[in-house]
Image (cartoon, rainbow, N blue to C red):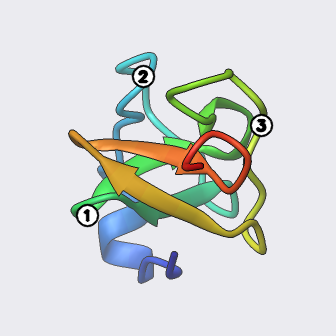
Amino acid sequence: MRSVDSKQRAASICSYCSTVVPEGQVLQAVDGQTWHAEHFMCGGCGKLLEATSRFTVRRGFAVCSECKR
């Protein structure tokens, strides 16, 4: 995951809910998609993933370490 610069933040749309992500809440992961922090979840179990969470990408979705087994 990486931070997004201020120009990108202004136009960031959440991949989960399709609404604007306010500055300071932008997460960018999984093939450059943008997420609200509260919408970045495991595609297997729905567990919330944090910026420091370890995950794998499967079929375009983040999958937590428990589900990747």
Taking 54 as reference, is 44 above or below it? Answer: above
Helix, strand or loop for disc 2: loop
- In percent of width and height, residue 27 lies at 55, 60
Q: Which disc number belongs to residue 48?
A: 3
Seen at 63% across and 35% down, the residue is: 41
- In percent of width and height, residue 19 lies at 42, 22
- In percent of width and height, residue 3 lies at 53, 80
Q: CA distance from mark 3 to mark 2?
A: 18 Å
- From the viewer's perspective, is the residue at label 3 or at label 2 nearer? 3
- In percent of width and height, residue 68 lies at 55, 49
Seen at 33% across and 58% down, the residue is: 30
Q: Earlier in the sequence, mark 1 or mark 2?
A: 2
Helix, strand or loop for disc 1: loop
Q: Earlier in the sequence, mark 1 or mark 3?
A: 1
- From the viewer's perspective, is the residue at label 1 or at label 3 nearer? 3
Taking 19 as reference, is 41 above or below it? Answer: below
Q: CA distance from mark 1 to mark 3?
A: 18 Å
In the picture provided, is 13 more to the left or to the right than 69?
left
Seen at 60% across and 35% down, the residue is: 42
Q: Which image quadrant is residue 18 in?
A: top left
Q: Which disc number belongs to residue 32?
A: 1
Name the amino acid type tagged 3.
Answer: Leu
- The residue under label 2 is 19
Q: Which image quadrant is residue 10 in?
A: bottom left
